[in-house]
Image (cartoon, rainbow, N blue to C red):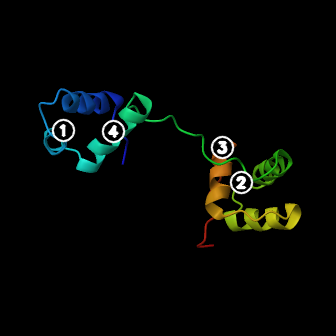
Amino acid sequence: MKAYSNDLRRAIVTSYETQEYSQRQVARVFGVSLATVRNYLRRQRASGNPDALPHAGGRRATLSPQAQARVRQWVTERNDIPLQVLCRRTRGVFKKQISHSAMCRLLQALGLRRKKEDLAR
């Protein structure tokens, strides 16, 4: 689910702070949960701002630049190589375990497109 906009967050806090509505009434008017209203009010008290925090950036890449270059080489040599083979090769050559989903994300980050292997052959 996508985060609520900062405009909505500010409107929720403002409508409660005018003391016209209770927390429950604010939640009902804006169609959010009571916990959401309480969280926004708590954030407003703690930081002076109910806005969402910026994205932290996610996890760092698990493979070194050398390993990424080798994966790029493998895929450019044979673009229908299965993810299992790429993961196995990476584990064998670089002693680094990587999941299929992480390998898929790496290929997307490197801008590499793979041709799907035809399993009916």
The residue that disc 2 covers is 79
Query: Could you tell me if residue 59 is visible in this image?
Result: yes
Graded by Cα atoms within 10 Å as few (under 14), some (14 to 19) or many (20 or more), the crowding at tag 3 reads few
The residue that disc 4 covers is 40
Residue 35: % across, % down? 28, 49
Q: Which mark is residue 20?
A: none
Q: Nearer the viewer, residue 113 or 57?
A: 57
Amino acid type at circle 3 is Ala
Alpha-carbon distance for marks 4 and 3? 35 Å
Whichever of labels 4 and 2 marks the residue nearer the N terminus, that label is: 4
The residue that disc 1 covers is 30
The residue that disc 3 covers is 109
Amino acid type at circle 1 is Phe
- C-beta proximity under 8 Å, tags 4 and 1: no
Alpha-carbon distance for marks 3 and 1? 39 Å
Quarter of image, res 48: top left
Kindly identify the residue that appears in the image at 77 percent across and 68 percent down: 88
Mark 3, secondary structure of its residue: helix
Whichever of labels 3 and 1 marks the residue nearer the N terminus, that label is: 1
Kindly identify the residue that appears in the image at 83 percent across and 52 percent down: 67
Residue 52: % across, % down? 42, 35
Q: Nearer the viewer, mark 4 or mark 1?
A: 4
From the viewer's perspective, tell me whether residue 112 is left or right of residue 21: right
